[in-house]
Image: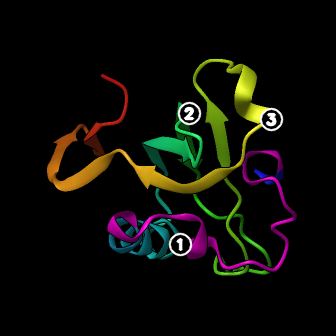
Amino acid sequence: MCTLFGRELRGEPFMRLWDEASRELVGALVPTVADEAVAVVAGVAARTTEGSHADLKLLLPPPLYHRGRTHGRLLGVLAPISAHGWLSAERVGALEIGARPRDARPRRGLTVYDGGRK
């Protein structure tokens, strides 16, 4: 993540990494993961100010239990779907989630959000 954004992200609010259009959805996903102990997998687009683009996958697994509580921290993974030469040379301005709630459909207990890679 620090390499994508070209800076140290420790102490920076997670929501600040997302574009304005994505903040509402991401802001709803995070408490859902924490409160309901469910995992989320989503497509994410990363764009640089130079115009480069990469498709990423976001995985937010259920939170770890610590002393019977789940709201301590969430761990997640944000990984590129394929390698791009610019990933260490250009800085991402903001992330865009590739899904919108109207595109959701349940599948055997998992909610699938269409979007992301096409």
- Mark 3: which secondary structure? loop
View extreme (left): residue: 102
What's under tag 1, amino acid-wise? Answer: Ala
Residue 97: percent from the left, percent from the top?
A: 40, 51
Q: Which residue is mark 3?
A: 89
Residue that appears at 30% across and 22% down: 118
User: Percent position (x, y) of residue 56?
Assistant: 55, 35
Q: Which residue is mark 1?
A: 34
Of the two numbered discs 1 and 3 on the same chain, state the one appearing first in sequence.
1
SS category of the residue bearing label 2: loop
Over which residues does the magenta segment extend? 3-22
- Badge nearest the viewer, 1 or 2: 2
Residue drawn at point x = 71 percent, y = 79 percent: 68
Q: Name the residue at 52% across, 38% down.
A: 51
Residue farthest to the front? 50
- Which is more toward the observer, 12 or 94? 94
> What number is the disc on residue 76?
none
Q: Residues within 10 Å of mark 3 (few under 14, many from 20)?
A: few
Going from N to C along the chain, the mark reached first, 3 or 2, is 2
Between label 1 and label 3, give the one nearer the viewer: 3
Q: How many numbered marks does the figure carry? A: 3
87 to the left or right of 8? left
- C-alpha gap between disc 3 and disc 2: 11 Å
The residue at the point 56 percent across, 33 percent down is: 52
The Cα–Cα distance between marks 1 and 2, rounded to whole angstroms, is 33 Å
Question: What kind of colouring is applied to the model shown?
Answer: rainbow
Residue that label 2 marks: 52
- Counting from the top left corner in percent of width and height, residue 23 is at 41, 71
> Is residue 85 positioned above or below 61 on the image?
above
